[in-house]
Amino acid sequence: MMKVLKHLTPLACAVALTNPGCAGAQDMTGPQEAEVAKADPATDAAGSIDWEKEFGVEKKVPDPVTGELPVAPYETSPANAGAKPFQHSNMAQAFGGQAGIRAIVNRFVELNTTDPRIDAIFRNQDIVRLRRTLFEQFCYLLDAGCAYTGRDMKSAHKDLGVTRADLNALVENLQKAMREAEVPFAAQNRFLAKLAPMDKDVVTR
Ligand code: HEM
């Protein structure tokens, strides 16, 4: 959504220099126009144009409780997690139970969103929701007592343009997060092997 907005803002500014949201609008105007640019949008006809509405940009309102943005409706299913959970294994324990998994997911998200190789893909995405759904997915797959309520891997990644190199960077970040949490090496590798077949739904170019 913000991606669209980013493209629209300069366009809206070019169309109407009076748009109060246009950074630097005054720089581009003469003395008269500058006056108009400063006019109160509430009383100025041009300034009161809702450009987002004009261009059909839908405003997403965060949920007041969770802070998550709404997503298009989808059917919830455990199959959306992309793999079957471990069973009768000590994987949940190796990851430190739900508290350990949450800490690993939070660190993993932090690494991805600050990694110059892939941070652009995470920009303007709903990181609050990502933290929750990733936690659910990991917790569900590791048989640590959670249900996965997120989207399937294909739908969630279809518009992101993820490459094999992006995936490799993300896997390195997950390895780092697991290593820092002292997850035993064998358990790290078993978990990575569980996620590996999802590459066909995540890598799109
Ligand atoms: C096997 C590897 C991967 C797994 C298991 C995975 C898992 C997930 C999950 C569970 C979600 C949340 C779905 C939802 O909100 O309903 C998600 C969303 C997302 N993933 Fe991945 N992911 C993988 C690879 C990647 C890669 C390589 C990137 C980019 C480098 C990436 C970037 C994102 C982004 C930006 C979102 C948010 C999309 C949105 O909210 O529309 N993922 N992923």
Image (tube, rainbow, N blue to C red):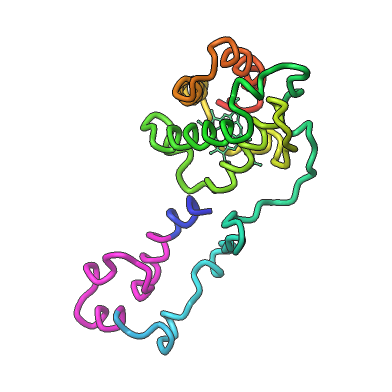
Q: Can you say whether 121 is above or below 176 in the image?
A: below
User: Is 26 included in the stretch rendered in magenta?
Assistant: yes
Q: Looking at the image, which residue is at 78% across and 34% down?
A: 78
Q: Quadrant of residue 84?
A: top right
- In the visual, does 41 lie left or right of 83? left
The residue under the point 43% across, 54% down is 6
By secondary structure, the bulk of the magenta-drawn segment is best described as: helix
State the residue lying farthest toward the left: 31
Q: Magenta residues?
A: 9-37
- The residue depicted at 64 percent of the width and 21 percent of the height is 195
Q: Position of residue 91 (x, y in %)?
A: 66, 19
Task: Give the residue drawn at x 45%, y 58%.
Answer: 8
Asked whether residue 179 is drawn in magenta, I would say: no
Query: Image height check: is 13 above or below 84?
Result: below
- Image location (x, y in percent) of residue 163: 51, 25
Residue 160 picture quarter: top right
Where residue 45 appears, as percent x and y from the top left, is 44, 85
Q: Is residue 178 left or right of residue 32?
A: right
User: Could you tell me if residue 157 is visible in this image?
Assistant: no
Q: Nearer the viewer, residue 31 or 177?
A: 177
70 to 96, vertically: above or below: below
Q: Residue furthest top?
A: 186
How many dots with numbers? Answer: 0
- Quadrant for the C terminus, please: top right
Horizontal arrangement in the rendering, residue 191 relative to residue 106 (left or right): right
Q: Quadrant of ligand 1?
A: top right
Position in image of residue 130 (x %, y %): 58, 42
The answer to whether residue 94 is above or below residue 124 is above
Quadrant for residue 116, please give it: top left
Asked whether the viewer can see residue 57, the reply is: yes
